[in-house]
Image (tube, grey):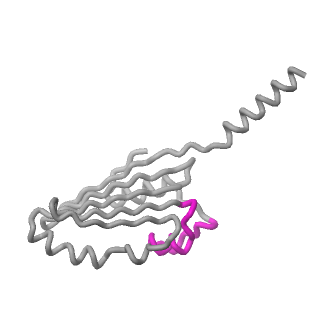
């Protein structure tokens, strides 16, 4: 009886430990400066095994003068996705002006457990991936971002 209880306890412990997946984070960043505007892009990409499960990105766009800031704000507002992404499950989007520091901060968060395939296509602009059948591969994502000039660390 004692052996049976010990085996049952071991099975319960092993099944509980094996069921949880560890989420790791890949950090990617890119800085660019053009015509008095500095852009900093930072991404934290959560992945389990080789599958991307979350993506948090922040873009900080800073002007070197008040004149440049005043000129860039209408353009950035025109490209805002706030209305387009509103109501999408698994997507959060914010864009904030910071006139005191002459910058605008845009944040986008994607939760691949919640986002629909159609919404992902809208957000990413990539209609070749079907989230219901495919996964977003972390190594391919790293390769693609590094090809765009990002520096990524797993």
List x then y, in percent, for residue 50: 55, 50
**Which quadrant of the rendered structure holds the C terminus?**
top left
The magenta segment is 112-133
Residue displayed at 68% across by 39% down: 18
**Which quadrant of the rendered structure holds the N terminus?**
top right
Is residue 44 a member of the stretch shown in magenta?
Answer: no
Residue displayed at 18% across by 73% down: 72
Compared to 29, does 85 lie above or below? below
Left or right of 15? Residue 146 is left
Dominant secondary-structure state across the stretch colored magenta: loop
Left or right of 86? Residue 72 is left
Q: How many marks?
A: 0
Compared to 114, does 6 lie above or below? above
Indicate the quadrant where residue 11 lies: top right
In the image, farthest residue toward the right: 1
Residue sitting nearer the eye, 134 or 1 = 1
Left or right of 39? Residue 136 is right
Indicate the quadrant where residue 106 lies: bottom left
Indicate the quadrant where residue 92 lies: bottom left
Residue displayed at 43% across by 55% down: 143
Residue displayed at 82% across by 30% down: 8
Is residue 121 a member of the stretch shown in magenta?
Answer: yes
List x then y, in percent, for residue 138: 50, 53
List x then y, in percent, for residue 94: 36, 66
List x then y, in percent, for residue 99: 17, 65
Residue sitting nearer the eye, 65 or 148 = 65
């Amino acid at each position: 009886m004692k052996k049976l209880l010990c085996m049952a306890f071991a099975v319960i412990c092993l099944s509980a430990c094996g069921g949880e997946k560890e989420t790791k984070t890949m950090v990617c960043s890119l800085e660019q400066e053009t015509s008095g505007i500095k852009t900093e892009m930072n991404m934290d990409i959560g992945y389990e095994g080789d599958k991307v499960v979350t993506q948090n990105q922040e873009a900080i766009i800073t002007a070197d003068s008040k004149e440049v800031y005043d000129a860039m704000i209408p353009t950035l507002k025109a490209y805002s996705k706030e209305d387009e992404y509103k109501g999408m499950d698994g997507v959060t989007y914010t864009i904030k002006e910071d006139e005191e520091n002459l910058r605008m901060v845009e944040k986008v968060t994607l939760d691949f457990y919640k986002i629909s395939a159609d919404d992902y296509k809208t957000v990413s602009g990539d209609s070749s991936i079907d989230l219901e059948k495919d996964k977003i591969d972390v190594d391919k994502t790293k390769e693609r971002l590094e090809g765009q000039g990002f520096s990524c660390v797993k």
